[in-house]
Amino acid sequence: MSYYVVRRTGQLIVFLGLAFVLAQQAKAAEKWWNAQWEMRIPIAVSASSGITPNRPVVISWADVAARLGGEDVRLGSLRLVRDGKSMPFQLDHRDSTGRFLPPGDLRLAPTDELVFTAPSDRRTVSYLYLSRSPVPPVAFASGVSVTPIRDGQAHQRLSTAGLSIDVQGPGPLDPATVSAANHGRASVVGMTWKGLTLTGQSSNWSVVMNSPPFPTAEGDCWRTVKLLVDGPVRKVVTTGCAGSTVKNADGSVALAADVTRYFSMFSGVPLYDVEDVVECTAAQGEWTGIYADRLILGHRPQLDDVLIDGSSGTPVRVALTDKSIPQIADGRFDGSGGLVQSKEVVDGWYAWLNEKDKLGVAVFYGAKQGGKPRPEQMQYGSGWAMWHFDNWVTFAYTGLQSSATLRHRFRVAALEPPSVESIAAEYRLWENDMEGLVAVGVVERRAK
């Protein structure tokens, strides 16, 4: 077997190296799974100490098509086989701007994505079987549940592996349910990890994750959250806002854009992804967008909680016990204050851990690889308040044009908690689209 790895500097395919290839060729090829299929492509996923037992694997179809050399195959013929067993997978359609497309198109485009999961702690080789001929259809049970919510606080609940998130579109859905202003539009307004609360919706609707910088207070334009991608491995729900407008202090338009947000979960992996596609319709050159995460680890902030800030490139531990944070009678923090302010982000991640309860959450953030234009600057800040921890991520642009499409992305992972080193390593895999971890082999053909 010969393998290649894709480095995301364009679509350059780089040979892994003679030693690796010879090592692979020395291993006996796996027995052909089914004689109905005339082709297969091996996909190797290396072991890497991770923050979750399994990790999602997302491969651009362009990488597979490069191995096929223009050979036509049927979408319905695809099968993923590991250790002689057919494994759950899916093929998701996307366009060149990054938008997910509804299912139904039987053509395979370079921008489509092959999606499956693999163990983090051991190397695996899966075989993608392909055929030019029709084969019987296949279906797999879903590992992610998606449930519409009718409790007045969100639209859709996604759950897997002990992690559950509630996603809201427009709001307020039911202003009578809480007294606080509703800041949860197009955000995760509820998150639980193995039964423990990470956002305190019952106390304040402002405690939400992934709050976007696109104002909608005048005439709420966010659409109801709907299930868009209903695969066995990845579920994607979406909301959007057409014509979101950011104004300067003098009332002029700094940015007008059509915004689409995608919230994804992967079967058996306690994390979720958020992707924004921001299609600008008006811009004055400079724009700064601030995303906010407001969370808790349990029922309220505690002095046992620890912030790990990875923004400088060297993780920094910020223990609340080292801070002079005033508390009131019931143990809540009194007032608010700052903890971290990083004006130049090198590595886009942070984590909150409660080492006493063995609970935590890591957040990765950045601009999508290959996206244009790239932010001129990213910043990260964190602080504490009475009911929650504040975290904010800033994307600053200069020279922004009306025709630009911005792509921001985030990954939020529940932790138990792992080492700081493993969080940093997982972030780098995510930031570089798993470069060096996933290798797509050359086409193997069935012996006649």
Image (cartoon, rainbow, N blue to C red):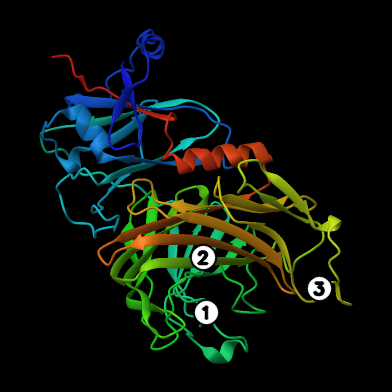
Question: Quadrant of residue 384 in the image?
Answer: bottom right
Which of the two residues, 170 or 130, is positioned nearer the viewer here? 170
The percent coordinates of residue 138 (x first, y second) are: 26, 44
Which of the two residues, 5 or 80, is positioned nearer the viewer here? 5
At horizontal 57% and vertical 37% (from top left) the residue drawn is 425
Question: Quadrant of residue 109 in the image?
Answer: top left
The percent coordinates of residue 125 (x first, y second) are: 39, 25
Q: Residues within 10 Å of mark 3 (few under 14, many from 20)?
A: some
Q: Residue 210: give its label.
A: 2
At horizontal 55% and vertical 45% (from top left) the residue drawn is 346
Q: CA distance from mark 2 to mark 3?
A: 24 Å
Question: Quadrant of residue 27 in the image?
Answer: top left
Quarter of the image containing the C terminus? Answer: top left
The amino acid on which the numbered mark 2 sits, given as a three-letter code, is: Asn
Residue pointed to by mark 3 = 332
Q: Is residue 24 above or below residue 438?
A: above
